[in-house]
Image (cartoon, rainbow, N blue to C red):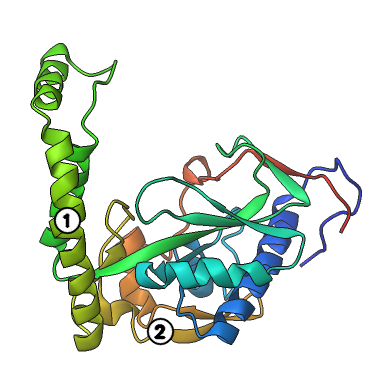
Amino acid sequence: MPSPPSTPGDPLSVPEIQAVLIGILREVVAICDAGGIPYCLVGGGCLGLVRHDGGFVPWDDDLDLAVWASDMPRFVAAMAALPAHLAMRVKSDQTNPSYMVMDMRTRTVDSGFEGAGVFIDIMPMMLWRSARWKAFDRTLDRVRRLGWNAGSPPARNAVKRALRLARVPGAAAWLAERCFYPLFRRQDRAGRRSGRGVVTAAYRQIWPGLYDYRTVFPVQTARFCGVAVSAPRDLHRYLSRRYGPDYMQPPPEEARWRHFSGALRIAEG
């Protein structure tokens, strides 16, 4: 894979963006391995492992890693060892936030994150007793975030305003923090000991798809663009759940989604 251009201001081609991503991945994986921090490659990287012979989906400009939510504080602390050209940044201020690890020698264009370099996503995962518990978490979060939306029908907004006046969102937040989130954490620990449950995003987060524990764990070691990474145990089941049973068939060009419209090199390196 070609090295990124050394001239500041130059736009990065997709292969050059992918080279930057591999550089970030190599550093993050090395720190996780040295610190004994479990993680798993998820999303399009897994599709690349199977459909594209261990490389990137040709148009992809992103990589995703999942870390247990309970290990995320340790992960964040460990990332202090990143080389100077890499930085970690929180992507949201909610409970169990996801993070990005970015190359500060680059800048993305239209990524939705001001000043962000080319980045990989770090997402918190949990083990749930069942899909119903995760659905309950989503409902609970919607209630605690209840608000008026300008584009919603007037009747729906009236109901929301009434519920807010009745302090329902505050009550939901109190119950979540005091009762349900501790319960979810206990379920996560118990499920990981027993090897049973559903793997997906941590509470107050959402991923595309829910996966049986034995689809993902114990992880296997795979090579992605030459980097040894942890990947789901059963990639066929994982990818069928994530992308559908015809995941080996590339989508039409108009459906090939990118995370940003482009990227620039802003410093030599």
Which of 67/261 is in front? Answer: 67
Q: CA distance from mark 1 to mark 2?
A: 33 Å
The reply, left or right, for residue 204 in relation to residue 179 is right
- Res 178 label: 1
Task: Give the quarter of the image for residue 132.
Answer: bottom left
Residue that appears at 17% across and 46% down: 174
Q: Position of residue 41 (x, y in %)?
A: 48, 71
Residue that appears at 53% across and 83% down: 222
- Res 28 label: none
Residue that appears at 37% across and 56% down: 96
Q: Position of residue 66 (x, y in %)?
A: 43, 67
The residue type indicated by label 1 comes to: Arg
For label 1, the SS is helix
Q: Position of residue 156 (x, y in %)?
A: 13, 20
Determine whether 162 is above or below 167 in the image: above
Residue 156 visible in this rendered orientation of the protein:
yes
- Mark 1 and mark 2 lie on one chain; the one further toward the N terminus is 1
The reply, left or right, for residue 25 in relation to residue 233 is right
Around disc 1, counting alpha carbons within 10 Å, would you say few (fewer than 14), some (14 to 19), or many (20 or more)?
few
Residue that appears at 37% across and 83% down: 233
The quarter of the rendered structure image containing the C terminus is bottom right
The reply, left or right, for residue 229 in relation to residue 194 is right
User: Residue at label 2?
Assistant: 219
The quarter of the rendered structure image containing the N terminus is bottom right
For label 2, the SS is loop
Around disc 2, counting alpha carbons within 10 Å, would you say few (fewer than 14), some (14 to 19), or many (20 or more)?
some
